[in-house]
Image (tube, rainbow, N blue to C red):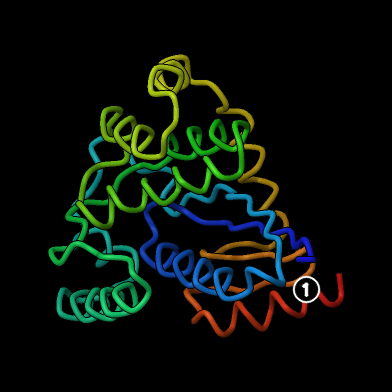
């Protein structure tokens, strides 16, 4: 009988390595389907919480934040595209174009998690795909609602969450909680509240950690 393992996946829709990390974790869980019963929860983290509604040009943003050149950024995008392709996640060749505020996406993920873990997972995948795969803005309501529809969730209920600003306090509290736990980079994956795996690791790393978590509880 598969062993339950609690998995907190702390991440941001804006983070390309989070898409790689999730695809890698999914691959590991497929391989361990007979051994592990995942209890997967997506937790909020904003890389750019002060980003305005107009967003910012991606090249400009990365240069200001990390001091990288356009050439270095293109090389990094190519590495990420290759890693994604290996795991079945297709990144848009042109990149994302702009960086956007992702708080509303996190509010919808919180709402989806109240529906079920499976629906939250489906919405997370859809949000990553519309942004990193299609270059569409996760700050736009209609883009978010398209992701909701793809995930098989109630679009009108999601629209109400957006309009009424529901779950703002809950998301802020969760963000604060994980920061207080020492999470300052994503993706960060915590197994059974004990083991931390950071970055877009290969499936083998997740497999080993999941087996250890299942064995030690």
Mark 1 element type: helix
Relative to 38, does residue 211 appear above or below in the rendering?
below
Q: Residue at x 17, y 55 (%)?
A: 97
Residue 103 vertical position relative to residue 155 in the rendered view, above or below:
below
Q: Is residue 96 left or right of residue 195?
A: left
Residue at 39%, 60% (x, y): give it: 15
Q: Position of residue 143 (x, y in %)?
A: 27, 35
Residue 154 or residue 14, whichever sits in front = 154
Residue 7 at x, y percent in the picture: 67, 60
Picture layout, residue 187 above or below residue 72:
above
Residue 212 spot, x, y in % from top left: 77, 80
Picture quadrant of residue 37: bottom right
Horizontal side of residue 43 vs 61, given as left or right:
right
Quarter of the picture holding the N terminus: bottom right
Instruction: Please say if 87 is above or below 189.
Output: below
Rendered residue at 73%/58% (across/down): 6
Depth order, front residue of 87/14 = 87
In the picture, measured across the screen, residue 144 lies left or right of residue 161, that is left
In the rendered image, which residue does mark 1 sit on? 213
Q: Is residue 186 left or right of residue 126?
A: right
Q: Residues within 10 Å of mark 1 (few under 14, many from 20)?
A: many
Between 198 and 27, the one lying in front of the other is 27
Residue farthest to the right? 216
The quadrant the C terminus occupies is bottom right
């Amino acid at each position: 009988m598969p062993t339950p393992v609690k998995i907190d996946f702390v991440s941001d829709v804006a983070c390309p390595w989070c898409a790689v990390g999730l695809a890698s974790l999914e691959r590991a869980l497929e391989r361990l389907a007979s051994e592990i019963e995942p209890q997967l929860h997506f937790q909020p983290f904003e890389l750019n919480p002060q980003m305005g509604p107009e967003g910012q040009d991606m090249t400009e943003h990365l240069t200001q934040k990390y001091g990288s050149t356009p050439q270095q950024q293109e090389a990094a995008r190519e590495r990420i595209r290759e890693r994604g392709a290996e795991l079945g996640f297709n990144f848009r060749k042109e990149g994302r174009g702009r960086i956007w505020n992702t708080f509303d996406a996190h509010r919808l993920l919180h709402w989806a998690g109240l529906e079920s873990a499976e629906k939250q997972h489906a919405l997370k995948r859809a949000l990553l795909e519309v942004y990193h795969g299609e270059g569409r803005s996760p700050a736009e309501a209609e883009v978010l609602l398209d992701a909701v529809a793809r995930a098989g969730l109630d679009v009108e209920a999601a629209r109400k969450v957006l309009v009424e600003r529901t779950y703002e306090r809950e998301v802020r509290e969760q963000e604060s909680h994980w920061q207080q736990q020492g999470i300052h980079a994503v993706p960060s994956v915590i197994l059974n509240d004990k083991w931390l795996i950071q970055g877009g690791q290969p499936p083998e790393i997740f497999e080993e950690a999941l087996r250890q978590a299942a064995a030690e509880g």
